[in-house]
Image (tube, helix red, strand yellow):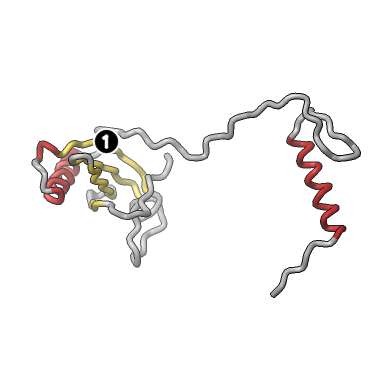
Amino acid sequence: MERSRPGAATLLVCGVLLQGCVGAQAGDEPVDAKTGRVEARGTSSKPLPERIPAPRAPVMGEAPADLVAQVREDATRRSGADPSAVRLIRDEAVTWSDGSLGCPRPGEFYTQAPVPGYWIVFDVAGRNFDYRSDGRGNFRLCESLRAAPPSAS
């Protein structure tokens, strides 16, 4: 199907709307009535707002000690590292946005209700082992490329 090109009336309306938008964005800058151009007396650029949120700072000491111990044991087993090389870098009480705990697996279905739980991360020789847990202590290693942080509280 071939698209039709806009007619002169459409272009005129779009031009008038755009001129109004430019005038509104220009603030107190005068607009030349004949050309519709903004007469810039001086330029001031404002920085764009930051669109990428800063990473969450790790929180420590919120997960139950027995859960942290179980997760440490799993990270040690999976990595094959000496237990002394397994360093805890996060154990935080969080609310996950759904039953995937921020770590969806292809082909699985999850409750779409918020799930209280814990976010536990260990560093083993520069590799992060990112564990997600529900409030009952069920945990799993998150290796998904679509992993997401917990819901903002």
* Residue 151 in the figure: left or right of residue 65: right
Label 1: element kind: loop
x and y, in percent, of residue 142 in the image = 28, 52
Q: Determine whether, in the image, residue 25 is placed left or right of residue 121.
A: right
Quadrant (top left/top right/bottom left/bottom right) for the N terminus:
bottom right
Q: Position of residue 47 (x, y in %)?
A: 59, 30
Q: Which residue is mark 1?
A: 62
Q: Residue at x 38, y 45 (%)?
A: 150
Query: Image quadrant of residue 63?
Result: top left
- x, y (%) of residue 32? 87, 34
Residue found at the far top of this picture? 42
Quadrant in the picture for the C terminus: top left
Closer to the camera, 12 or 134?
A: 12
Is residue 43 positioned above or below 6 on the image? Answer: above
**How many neighbours does mark 1 have within 10 angstroms: few (below 14), some (14-19), or many (20 or more)?**
some
Q: Is residue 110 left or right of residue 12?
A: left
Using the rendered view, name the quadrant where residue 23 is placed. Answer: top right
Going by the numbered disc 1, the residue's amino acid type is Glu
x 26%, y 33%: residue: 60
Which residue: 80% across, 47% down?
A: 17
